[in-house]
Image: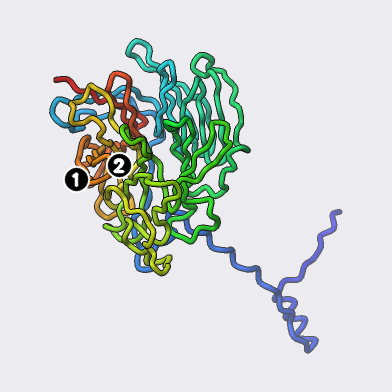
Amino acid sequence: MPIHRFRPSLSRLALVAALAGVSAPVLAQAPAPAAAPAPAWKQGMPANMATSTLAPLAGKLTVTPASEIPIDRIKLPPGFKVEIWATGLPGGRAMARGDDGKIYVGTRGIGRVYEVTDNAGQRSVRTVVDKLNQPAGVAFRNGSLYVMAIDKVLRYDGIEKNPAAAPVDMTAAFKLPKEPHHNWKYIAFGPDGKLYVPFGAPCNICELPTEEYAQIRRYNPDGSGMEVLATGVRNSVGFDWHPVTKELWFSNHGRDWQGDDTPNDTMHRLVRTGMNAGFPYCHEGKLPDTDVKKADACKGVEPPVALMGPHTATMGVTFYTGSMFPAEYRNVLFNARKGSWNRTKKIGYDVVMVKAGADGSNARVEPFMTGFMDEATQTFWGRPAYLMQMPDGSMLVSDEQLGAIYRVSYSR
């Protein structure tokens, strides 16, 4: 027969101890489980907003058929036309065009990079790579596709002609910072042939743990020759070079949890190597932070060219250089604003123009592509993220929310 081991209960131990005239043993209680850490997006939230219902807006990471996209709601200036150019790219963000015309599209949350092929006006989509850690950054140079995720850099040589091209792992050469927050990227090759890469702050608002964050850098294509071009850049995920001056202009996200109307997202120009955009001590070039403080917080900070609206999620930046649009659009900066979450009344969800002098003077922000959001109901259906000028002068606009690409054209 099996032997059953007897373990006295706590009450029986107490009774035995009482009869013996001794104190009952005290049993240690297990410590309470540690509370789960707050999500990264809540960092910096003040105590008086602890019950706020504001939170990042979930993307739709499934395929949306063209028939379900309300393209007729998009509004453009007279003479412009918009059409659905491609669908089937859930989470699609930044775009890069190959030498043979294929379009490569990075994503953030879904971990994929897509390839879009135009077959006589019909577009097909395939997945180049999947299950990477936020591979938002894609760039193309000399027949090779560069993909940059939070913890990996891959190069696909000859991929347009060879869909099965195996990636060359270049991660070690780039010495990527480890913290994931704001470390998804937009990358592009500049007029100098070098690869430009931003590294965002690893927090909403904080003293930087090391100096390798909140920077914009450039590298040789093989990852060598790293230079820091700008510091104090909280989160830049879009930039382009001015067609005349060749200066880098870049978008930047302001911090959250400092009210509906402060600080603004901003647009900057790289006026000198090593310029300071202010994070974490100063915002908009003039507003000292209320949580991370420093004497003369805005001293030496380069002011932005333009204020892009509070919490608008300013994303893709493209200077228009084509001949399809009217002459007044030439050399104008176009900016996709994906739209706010950290604001009681939504703002953004559009494409705007920044009209300014080549030196950044007299900047003004004007609407261009609207209709993705209903102001009255505060609901949205699309979130424009990135822009790309095509060889014929038309412009592609990626919609991260619906996984679509729209084509904007003009005819007189």
Give 81 or 364, whichever is nearer the viewer. Answer: 364
Q: Residues within 10 Å of mark 2 (few under 14, many from 20)?
A: many
Disc 1: which residue = 375
Q: Position of residue 251 (x, y in %)?
A: 35, 44
Q: Are marks 1 and 2 in contact (CB under 8 Å)?
A: no
Q: Which residue is mark 2?
A: 337
Query: Can you give x and y, in whole percent of width and height, for residue 350 in the image?
Result: 25, 39
Q: Could one spot residue 17 in this view of the protein?
A: yes
Quadrant containing the C terminus is: top left
Quadrant assignment for the N terminus: bottom right
How many marks overall?
2
The one nearer the camera, 37 or 114, is 114
Quadrant of the image occupied by residue 19? bottom right
In this rendering, the answer to whether 317 lies above or below 43 is above
Q: Amino acid at mark 1?
A: Glu
In the displayed structure, 140 sits above or below 336; it is above
For the point 50% across and 20% down, the residue is: 143
Instruction: Return the residue found at the far top.
Output: 120
Q: CA distance from mark 1 to mark 2?
A: 15 Å
